[in-house]
Amino acid sequence: MSDVIRLDVMKTYKLFVGGKFPRSESGRVYEVSDSKGQWLANAPLGTRKDTRDAVLAARAAVKGWAGTTAYNRGQVLYRIAEMLQGRREQFAAEVAAAEGIGAKKAATLVDQAIDRWVWYAGWTDKVAQIAGGANPVAGPYFNLSVPEPTGVVGIVAPQAGYGHSFLGLVSVIAPVIATGNTAVVAVAADAPLPALSLGEVLATSDLPGGVVNLLSGRTADIAPTLASHQDVNALDLAGAIAHEGPGAATVLEASAADTLKRVLWPAVDPAAQDWTVAPGTERLLSFVETKTVWHPMGQ
Amino acid sequence: MSTVAANAPGAAGGGLSDVAASEASLRRFLHGLPGVDAVGLEARAATLGTRSIKTSAKAYAIDLAISMIDLTTLEGADTVGKVRALCAKGRHPDPGDPGTPQVAAICVYPDMVATAKAALAGTPIQVASVATAFPAGRAALPVKLADTADAVAAGADEIDMVIDRGAFLSGRYMDVFAEIVAVKQACLRADGTSAHLKVIFETGELQTYDNVRRASWLAMLAGADFIKTSTGKVAVNATPPVTLLMLEAVRDFRAQTGVQIGVKPAGGIKTTKDAMKYLVMVNETLGDDWLSGHWFRFGASSLLNDLLMQRQKLTTGRYSGPDYVTVD
């Protein structure tokens, strides 16, 4: 019986929108190949309509996610790390294939990504201390500032460079959702498989549906839709090239200005950004709004 | 509109004039209606829901849908202020774009009719009032008639009555018929004109498609100007198959009697996509004659905001969001 040839069961990669795994509304896919041009899998070709659906899902999720306690959000982010740990080998293989690096380096990148979730999990209930607090005022008032989530954040995930396909992706998503925002992410167009697999982890990590939405496809379709969408509150251009073309940061920022979005600019050379270094709080504090309350003091 | 006046109770021609002569003849007629092919009906409704409508056709459909809306607030917590705000929204659905059409009507409880009437003075927008112990309809006939007369006296242009589902389901068709006739009488104004009568079946409680068909014919024979799916207060409201069935009923009724009856699906229609599916059904089943706010209405509240967001998308090219329409 041992001479029976067993066929591999190929995985159908799907989008991650609203906690579900839909195919693209267009029904189309595109071929994803590894760094040597070998075909790996077909990824769904997310469209503008998929983007709009994702924004609807993200908007619907804002109230619940922003309303959970910071402690609880930390628990969920930590749970994501736990789930990732169990699938470490799968992600290492996907990262190695996507970025053309050795298995050992890829495993290190995945470990760092897991640690990054834990790092941001710790930040969820501490960010209020560094971004808010009691303000001294010249009057009989308690004056308190607290950071609140901005809302729906559109993210152009890192598109190139060492570690971009997974560590870079986690490094831009985690800070956004740690503070209570929801995210619609245009994942790396050329290396979407680790990102699409991340959706499966997020779906089993107690993260409410719609908090993170992952779209693979042409960044030139998805990013401008996010930039001009009136129901997106902020834009993280981590993976957008600075100039030229419809997906360029300058064009996206101009389009985002129409609706007064917050925009976080990419590094001067996004491909050269080192995602392995400790991130700092810049991303965490880029997508919060400060609410200040004046409260009269009692007699 | 003259066809409406022709639909006096029992005035239906086409050999139907003696159908309601007795309980037995009414039952014989209603049970003699052909049975509904449920699978075929649902398949047809699903097929009509797959049409792709884009660009200028979509713009036309959105404006048409807005002009067909009965903008509704039927909450126990309704206030005079809320009704006024809703009327203002009905007059200018998108204050940023004066080209936006007005809605067809504002639908309120009877005690809010006078408020709505005053707020809509000088506009063609109608005031519709639910009546007859809406939404359950569990009250004695004199109470229902007083409820109706009260709304008409307060200035209601249209009355949305509920049928007695208990009587209908237990087979007392004549009771239901007589009640619709009586309410129709109560819609008469002092000057001889009459408020439009919409008859609500609460199709979610009628159990079968056959019952929906029977209720449609019963109401049309009794003099309804409009037949309406539901109150919006139960779990199952307007669905495409049920609406399609009612559209076919009014089509057949006009073919037989020459009297045109309007249709109003209500409840559960929340998105532009839903609304366009219904418009496609109307166009394919009934044609142009029904494609206006005179003959087809949407009973809805949140639908308007979605239509406005889609309208803004078409005019600006950007997807809009709920921050750019009013919170009702």
Image (cartoon, coloured by chain):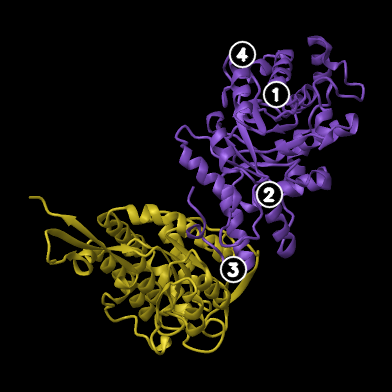
Chain colours: A yellow, B purple
Please give left or right for residue B238 compared with residue A276 in the image. Answer: right
Amino acid tagged 3: Arg
Looking at the image, is mark 1 or mark 2 nearer the viewer? 1
User: Residue A174's spot in the image, x, y percent?
Assistant: 35, 68
Looking at the image, is mark 4 or mark 3 nearer the viewer? 4
Residue A14 visible in image? no
Report crowding for label 4: few under 14, some 14 to 19, many 20 or more residues within 10 A (C-alpha): few
Please give left or right for residue B209 compared with residue A66 in the image. Answer: right
Chain-order first, disc 4 or disc 1: 4
User: Between B126 and B318, which is closer to the camera in this rendering?
Assistant: B126
Q: Quadrant of residue A33?
A: bottom right
On whether disc 4 and disc 1 are found on a single subunit, the reply is: yes
Label 4 – label 2 distance at C-alpha: 35 Å
Q: Is residue B303 positioned above or below B96 on the image?
A: above
Chain letter behind tag 4:
B
Asked if marks 4 and 1 touch (Cβ < 8 Å), the reply is: no
Kindly identify the residue that appears in the image at 69 percent across and 24 percent down.
Answer: B187
Amino acid tagged 2: Ser
Chain letter behind tag 2:
B
Label 4 – label 1 distance at C-alpha: 19 Å
Per the image, the residue denoted by label 3 is: A48
Per the image, the residue denoted by label 2 is: B67
Q: Which mark is residue B190?
A: 1
